[in-house]
Amino acid sequence: MTDLNHSDWLLNSIIKIMESIDAKISVSSFTTSSGGKKIFIYGIDDIAIEKIYFLTNTDQNNNYLSLEDFKVYIDKHYGPLDIPGLKEIMISMYTHSDIFSFLSNNRTHTPFTVKNILNTDYKGKTFSGYIDYLSASIPYVQHSEGRFKQYSITLNTN
C-alpha cells in the first residue's frame, strides 16, 4: 500500500464530501507538469451547487486548496457559457468564503451561495439565479434563465 500525502488526503476528502452531496457529481484529479495536483469536479446541478462545501484552509494546512476555474454549461449547448469575468467572480467568492470561515473557526465553507454574492444589484434567492442574472446582463452571452445548468470546478491543491 502506498503512503498517502497531504494532497491525496485532500482529494479523498473532497471525493467523500461530493459523494455525500450528490452521487451524480464526479471528481477526478491530475498531476501538473510541476508535480502539483489539481482536482476537477463536474456534473454539479443547480441544486447541488449551493450545497457544495470545501475544507477551510488554515495556517496549519500542508496544502492550500484554491479555486482555479469555474464553468457553467447549459442544456443543448456544446461548450461552457462564455460569461466575461465569471471565473474571476467565482475565485473571489471562493476566497471570501474561505477567509471568513477561517476567521469564524469553521472547518468548512460554502462558497456558491447567495450569502457570498456581495456588493451587487442582484436580489435573487439562488446561486443559479445569479448566473441567470449575469448571463442576461452581458451583451452577446447566451442566456441561461429557464435552462438546465451544470457546473464544473477546478481546484488547485498547492
Image: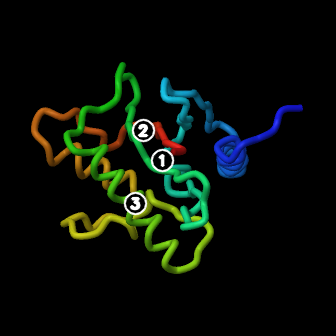
Q: Is residue 14 above or below residue 99?
A: above
The mark found on residue 95 in the picture is 3
Single out the mark in the foreground, 1 or 3.
Answer: 3
* Depth order, front residue of 44/86: 86
Cα distance in 3D space between marks 1 and 3? 21 Å
Where does the image place residue 133, in percent across and percent down from the top left? 24, 52
Residue at image mark 1: 46
Q: Is residue 13 above or below residue 44?
A: below
Image-based side of 22 in relation to 124, left or right: right
x 25%, y 32%: residue: 82
Q: Earlier in the sequence, mark 3 or mark 2?
A: 3
Q: Tell me the SS state at disc 2.
A: strand
Three-letter amino acid code at the position of disc 3 = Thr
Three-letter amino acid code at the position of disc 1 = Asp
* Depth order, front residue of 100/123: 100
Residue at image mark 2: 149
Q: Tell me the SS state at disc 1.
A: helix
Residue 113, located in which quarter of the rendered image? bottom left
* Depth order, front residue of 150/67: 67
Where does the image place residue 99, in percent across and percent down from the top left? 44, 69
Residue projecting furthest to the top: 78
Please say if the residues under marks 3 and 2 sit with CB atoms less than 8 Å apart: no
x 23%, y 43%: residue: 135
Please say if the residues under marks 1 and 2 sit with CB atoms less than 8 Å apart: yes
